[in-house]
Image (spheres, helix red, strand yellow):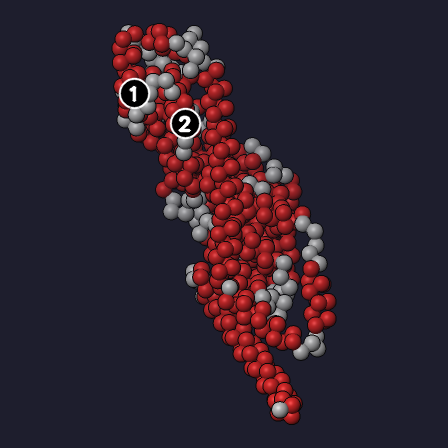
Amino acid sequence: MSKNIRNFAPAMIHWVRHMVLLFALAGLFCSCSQVEDARHVVAEADSLRTAGIAYDDSLSIAEAAATLSHVRNIYPTDYARANYYYGRLLRNRGDHPAAMLAFLNVVHSRTEDHEVLARSYSNISTLCHWADEYALSYEMYQKCAQQFWLCSDSVMYYYALNAMAFELARQQLLRESIDLTNQIEQECTDDGVLTKIWETRAEAFRVVEQYDSAIYCADILNAKGFIAPSGEVVKAQSFLALGIEDSAVYYAQIVMESPYANNTDKYNVLYILSHNDSTIEKDDIRALNSQRADIALQELTPESEKLAIAVDYLLQDLNRKPDLTWLWAILVTLLIIGVPSSIYISHKRKTHQLYSQKTTAAQEEHRILTEQNRQLEEKQIQRRENAMAEIDVFCNSITEENIKQKLCWKEFDQMCTIVNQRMFGFVDKLRARGITSDNEIKICILLVIGHFNTKQMATIVPSTYDSFKTTKSGVAKKLNISGKNMRSILLKIAIEH
């Protein structure tokens, strides 16, 4: 019996060793297969970019970036490129915080591909510029220019220098901006770059209120066939500042008709058109103001909130201390080399990571989304508080003696325009809820002002006491509220999106 046991034990140990080795080889094969699939996705994205086509398969590129993160020290360039394409896709879809994180993964990778580093820094700079963080954008464009210089792409290097000059212009550093564009003009021979510098010069002069020079530069920009309407925007704003309203309106209308105008361009020139009451009907002015408000609330405000979060991620990254955990990882790896069981443990860990990869990515995406929503909610609360404070200040300045003059009480359309501007489109919001008559709107305005009694409000409307109470009750019925809390409900309507 004991002899059989002694013979069986070595055979059992030998069998266990073979099984461990087979499991290790199987895990290694599965791991290598997924890594190669991820690298194939990156190569496909490279081919599409070379052909001028954006890679739009968000699931594949996201999975590729997650897979390559486990081997980012083995395939640093593939890892960097996967994050770059994923960041571009997220940026184009408006998810600026997640895009910033992807681009930061690129610049922190160990890749020596200077082109992908340069393009990632360029995208980081663009996000900073959209967030009006011009000094930070300038710093990132400096890094972008360095990387383009290292990869011997002289044209993109000078485009980056021009972008730096544009950020200097936005900071009202006229001399530094013009000097940099002069350097580009002396050194560069590319027609596209030499056209682009006139856009920068026009903006530089406009920002420091040298409007004649700004118009001159914008004329040269247009003469060179620049398709974006930035020259027309500069001329519209400059002519308005010079008091030449007809020319300002003319170029503003060109911007509105341009297929290349973005929301910011339209938002800027709508202000010019909405104040041209000499040739535009009042109904059209109200429509222009409404269109401008829609762009601000639906496009620019949500965009700016996301961009602020993205910039916060960048600032946190710039201020963080160096991460030396990889040194500890190397030490631990060295310690376990030669231990037979390490093969099995490594296999088990990798298998678990591969199976939980999609779940982990989904959880991380959910966490980031939850945090973004929390931050957006905090910003919305702050915006409502600021709006409430602004309305209170305006209302407190209104008295029974000055209300008719300050609000142009006898000119109903003009009064509505003033109230819309000072109370965030309050009159338009009332009309959307069925409050349409002149007296109904006046009563709502007086209730929001809040420091007149019923008799005073009836006198100001003007209306009889009984007629005032009847109209007020009709407003409350339309809004489905009681007369006691009408002011608080009306204030909520004023500050809502």
The residue lying toward the viewer, choosing from 88 and 316, is 316
Label 1 neighbour load within 10 Å: few <14, some 14-19, many 20+: many
What residue is at 53 percent from the left and 33 percent from the top? Answer: 211
Secondary element under disc 2, as helix, strand or loop, is helix
Image coordinates of residue 336 in percent, x first then y, are 70, 72
**Image height of 469 relative to 15, above or below:** above
Q: Name the residue under label 2.
A: 492
Q: Which of marks 1 and 2 is nearer the N terminus?
A: 1
Rendered-image quadrant of the C terminus: top left
Q: Is mark 1 on a helix, strand or loop?
A: helix
Q: Residue at 43% of width from left, 41% of height from top? A: 299
Instruction: Reply above or below: 9 against 209.
Output: below
Q: Is residue 23 left or right of residue 335?
A: left
Quarter residue 410 falls in: top left
The N terminus appears in which quarter of the rendering? bottom right
Q: Which of 45 and 108 is in front in this view?
A: 108
Residue 49, relative to residue 220: is it above or below?
below
Q: Which percent across, then down, holds residue 38?
A: 50, 69
Residue at point 56% right, 32% down?
209
Query: Hey, what amino acid is under mark 1?
Result: Val
Q: In this view, does 239 lie to the left or right of 466?
A: right
Q: Quadrant of residue 297?
A: top left
Q: Which of 206 and 493 is in front in this view?
A: 493
* Residue contact at pointers 1 and 2, CB within 8 angstroms: no
Callout 2 amino acid: Lys
- Residue under label 1, please give it: 475
Alpha carbon of mark 1 to alpha carbon of mark 2: how far? Answer: 15 Å
List x then y, in percent, for residue 293: 40, 33
Residue 9 seen from this side? yes
Q: Is residue 417 left or right of residue 243?
A: left
The numbered disc on residue 133 is none
Where does the image place residue 285, in percent across and percent down from the top left?
Answer: 35, 28
